[in-house]
Image (tube, helix red, strand yellow):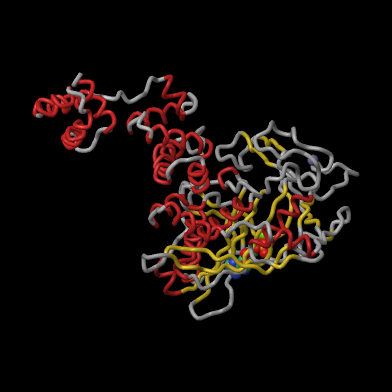
Amino acid sequence: MATTTTDAVMDYDEVLERFDPVMGLEVHVELSTATKMFCSCATEFGAEPNTQVCPVCLGLPGALPVVNATGVESAIRIGLALNCQIAEWCRFARKNYFYPDMPKNFQTSQYDEPIAFDGYLDVEIPSSTGEGVDVFRVEIERAHMEEDTGKSLHVGGSTGRIHGAEYSLLDYNRAGIPLIEIVTKPVVGAGERMPEVAKAYVSAIRDLMRALDVSDARMEQGSMRCDANVSLMPKGSTQLGTRTETKNVNSLRSVERAVRYEMTRHGAILSGGGSILQETRHWHEDTGVTTSGREKSDAEDYRYFPEPDLVPVAPSREWVEELRATLPEPPGRRRKRLQGEWGYSDLEMRDVVNAGAVELIEASVAAGATPAAARKWWMGEVSRRANDQVRDLADMGVTPEHVAELDGLVRDGRLNDSMARQVMDGVLAGEGSPREVADARGLELVQDDSALEAAVDEVLGRNADIVAKIQDGKVQAAGALIGQVMKAMKGQADAAKVRELILAKCQ
Ligand code: ADP
Ligand code: MG
Ligand code: ZN
């Protein structure tokens, strides 16, 4: 399928003159439990295909699923962090459909009885006045538990899609990995800032998942995925328009771009008298457009029914309250606190947050680095390399302890700036810790005493009388000379060392 399109789009400002945008975001988060949602298969990312499978996740006849308690615990903690109600009693449901990467022919999910519902998340966007932030509240419809599908690899075509492929390979390692789907209510009232709110919301969800330590929430690896529903209402209308659902938008930036693009595409169709087809669409990062996926009506009949092989989930109120007590400091508040502690400007902090470096800097500071040095290294050399290699900062082979050690070497005067950069090169190249690299590469500032000696000689030459006193044993007289030498060195000398040199030269 072509990734280009000739779809007409309307100027963004014109869209906003004529319409009010509405969006709904569905975010899937893969939990980082050790085992799958309904069996004890491992969940490790990147294993050989089909090595983490069993009769349950392969849907073999007679296999019986068992709920992963940690999965339920994570779901409740996520629900609480999203200010949701937690169901007193809920069930899993079978969502029946056929797809080759789903060997059971149904997905175990939740339908009308989600574990968490009716919440909200406050997200921050840069204020339109240019100073500070505006807070926008996104209402949460529900957060429910389900399982992931397997992965298909379509081989032989030019696009990697099933169309045109010669054959397809299936990997069921991912089938059955716990997912939490977080669904917003229709978001209205953000106007021109809708795409920004979309990005800020997904970013806030990512931060929250990491703070809760329930998922690594990496969009580029697929452990967090977002579908963006968009529609337009004619200005003044309160009746929701027909939506499209753009699938698997896999970076924060694409969330923002995809929402914006769909607004302009809908605008062109609607103002040309056309109507929107309710369908899924695919986002193309390279061309910045969406293309049609499959038609999808609200009444799609998945023949949901309660899962008969699993017991209902009825978390006691005591347990829920225990879990509430484990919630982390809300990310927004935590960010403000850290910014204050580190003394970063708003801009610096925003860059750090966008680079996903908050935790790394926090750990570096805990290991002894100054906040300024921690920011300098993570946001400088390491970020540059990570961007070049399209890798995560945390995967560059540099640890917070490395950063703290390197900063220590600089502050102890063993390394200057350019040497420290060479040491960081070595650490990035896997040559070892900063101290090991500095030793192996023979990097060490030579203490250059020649300037100091010259200053001492010059001062001694000008003060023959005092020199004579010192030679007579009146060592205290050296004090007057030390001051002069320090002045000549503009304070850049160690007074004890100056004294030592003076006394030595007077012998
Ligand atoms: P689906 O089964 O199609 O994925 P969901 O209920 O899981 O449906 O998600 C639909 C999402 O779209 C929700 O976030 C919902 O708030 C949002 N939504 C519903 N109607 C509209 C609309 N007219 N315009 C924009 N978003 C909408
Ligand atoms: Mg959905
Ligand atoms: Zn299994």
Q: Nearer the viewer, residue 333 or 11?
A: 333
The spot of residue 115 in percent (x, y) is 75, 62
Image-based side of 214 in relation to 490, left or right: right
Q: Nearer the viewer, residue 491 or 48?
A: 491
The spot of residue 172 in percent (x, y) is 73, 39
Quadrant assignment, res 373 = top left
Image-based side of 178 in relation to 311, left or right: left
Above or below for 350 versus 121: above
Residue found farthest to the bottom: 236
Write down which quadrant ligand 2 falls in.
Answer: bottom right
The spot of residue 345 in percent (x, y) is 38, 55
Which quadrant is the C terminus positioned in? Answer: top left
The spot of residue 3 in percent (x, y) is 51, 47
Which residue shows up at 53% across the image and 36% down it? 395
Quadrant assignment, res 77 = bottom right
Report the number of numbered marks: 0
Above or below for 265 versus 435: below
Residue 134 visible: yes
Residue 275 visible: no
Image-based side of 208 in relation to 77, left or right: left
